Amino acid sequence: MSEVHHGVLGLFPDSVLVKGARLMIDGISAEDLAADFGTPLVVYCEQTLRGRARSLKAAVAGGHVAFGTKAFANVAVLRLLREEGIGVDVASVGELAFARAAGFHGEEIIVHGNNKDAALLSEAGVEGAAVVLDAPDEAGLAAAAGVRRVLVRVTLGVDADTHEAIRTGHHGSKFGLPPAQAIELVEDALARGLDVLGLHVHIGSQLADFDAQAETIARLASFAATCREVLGWTARIADLGGGFGIRHTTDEHAIDASILASSAVTTAHLAFAEAGLPGPEVWLEPGRSIVGTAGVTLYRVGAVKRLPERTWVTVDGGMSDNPRPQLYHAAYTALSAGRADEPVNERVSIAGMHCESGDVLIDDVALPAPRRGDLLAVPATGAYTLAMASNYNGVPRPAAVLVGGGVARLIRSRETIADLLRAEV
Ligand SMILES: Cc1ncc(COP(=O)(O)O)c(C=O)c1O
C-alpha cells in the first residue's frame, strides 16, 4: 500500500481497512456493498457513530448532547444515537417526525428554526420540548401554542472562520437576535410565564478551531450577567450549538470533537464564574462531528475523458446526492475501492452526471488510472449530503446502509422513478 493510502484512510470510518485490492468497511468489501445495494450508496459505520456519540457524551459530563438532526435525518441512526444517551435538535415538523419515529420525546428534544411555523410550535408544546426562541414575537406565539420550556438565541457578533453560508453568529445574521433585542425577548418570555431555561448560541459549522467559540462563550457569559443585572433572571443552561469540524481531505485539519466539547464546558464554567454567575449546564448540538466521518459514499465510474486540459472521471451521482461542493466549495478526496493496492498514478477531476458544468465532486485527486466500472469511495460524506440531496435531473436519491458487527442493513431505500412521479398531478 502506498503512503497516499495511509493518509486517506485516516479520513474514513474507524472500521475501514484495505485488504489486498479491496476497501473493507467493518469486514465487508465496498465492492460487495455496491453489488448488493447499488450505487451511489452512502455507507454508515455503526462503530464510528457510537464511538463519536460516546466520546462527546463523556466530554460534556453532566451536560446534554443533542444531535443536529439536519446533518442526517434517519430513523435508524437516530435510534442508535438515542441508545447512546444522545438527544436531538430538530428544525422542522419533518425532522421532529424522524425524531419521534426513533423514540425521542419530551425533554430529549430541542426545537430550532428562524421561522417556526404554527405546526412546529404546537407539536413542540405537545412534546414538552425545549424551544429556542429566534424572533422578537416568538415568546407570544410559543406560549399560545402551549410551549412551556424555552431558550433564547443570541447573536454576539463573532465571525467564525468558516464558509459564509454556514457562518451564523455575526451581527446581521438571519439567526438569533443581537443582545439588545434578545434581552427584550427574555423579558417577554418571562412575563408570559414561560420557563426560560437559558441562552443559545451557534456561530457556524465546520469551525476550524476553538478561537471563535472561546470568544463567543466569553461574550455569552457577559450577556448572561447583563440579563441577571437588568432582569434578575439567571440562565441555568448555556446551549453552545454545534459546529465542530471534521477532515474531508488530508489537507484539512480538525481538532477532535470530544476535546473541543470538554474545552467548551470548561470555558463556559470559567467564564460564567468570572462574570459572577453560577456554572451553567452546558448543552451541545453536534451534527457533522457525529455522522460526518461515519459516512462513505460509493460511486461507480462511467465515462472517462482524457482531454488535453484535464481528465474527467464521471460518476453515477453528483450534486443531487452531495451539493456541498457547489454550496460551500467543499473539497473531497476519493479512493479506488476495488483497486486500492495499485499506485495512484493519475491526477483527475471527478465529475457528477448532472447537466451543470459546476457539478464537479472533486476538482483534483490522484487515483490508479481510472476506467469505466471502477468503484470510488468518497470519505467524510455522512453529514449534509443525503440530508441535502435533491432529485435534480429526475435522479432518484441514493440508498443508505448501516454496517455493524460485520452485517450491512438498509437504513434508507433507494428512491424509484415511481417515487419521483408520485407527487405529480
Ligand atoms: C442551531 C444549530 N445547532 C446545531 C447545528 C449542527 O452543526 P454541526 O453539524 O456543524 O455540528 C446547526 C447547523 O447548522 C445549527 O444551526
Image (spheres, rainbow, N blue to C red):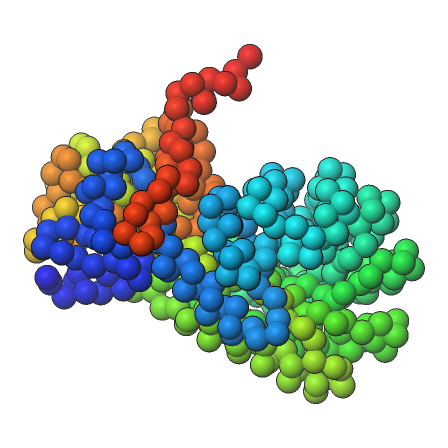
Residue at (57% x, 64% y) in the render? 65
Does residue 86 sit above or below 323 in this rendering? below
Residue 217, quarter of picture? bottom right
In depth, the one of 20 and 191 nearer the eye is 20
Residue 46 in view (yes/no): yes
Does residue 159 sit above or below 127 in this rendering? below
Residue at (37% x, 60% y) in the render? 48
Does residue 384 sit above or below 52 in this rendering? above
Residue at (70% x, 75% y) in the render? 280
Q: Quadrant of the N terminus?
A: bottom left
> Residue farthest to the top?
425
In depth, the one of 121 and 45 nearer the eye is 45
Does residue 240 sit above or below 78 in this rendering? below
Residue at (37% x, 35% y) in the render? 398
Q: Quadrant of the C terminus?
A: top right
Task: Measuring from the top left, give residue 191's x and y in whole percent.
Answer: 91, 59
Task: Measuring from the top left, give residue 113's x and y in whole percent.
Answer: 67, 48
Q: Is residue 407 left or right of residue 417?
A: left
In depth, the one of 82 and 31 nearer the eye is 82
Task: Measuring from the top left, give residue 351's x and y in whole percent.
Answer: 27, 39
Count the marks: 0
In depth, the one of 357 and 80 nearer the eye is 80
Residue 361, quarter of picture? top left
Task: Measuring from the top left, give residue 347's x and y in whole percent.
Answer: 15, 51
Residue 310 in view (yes/no): no
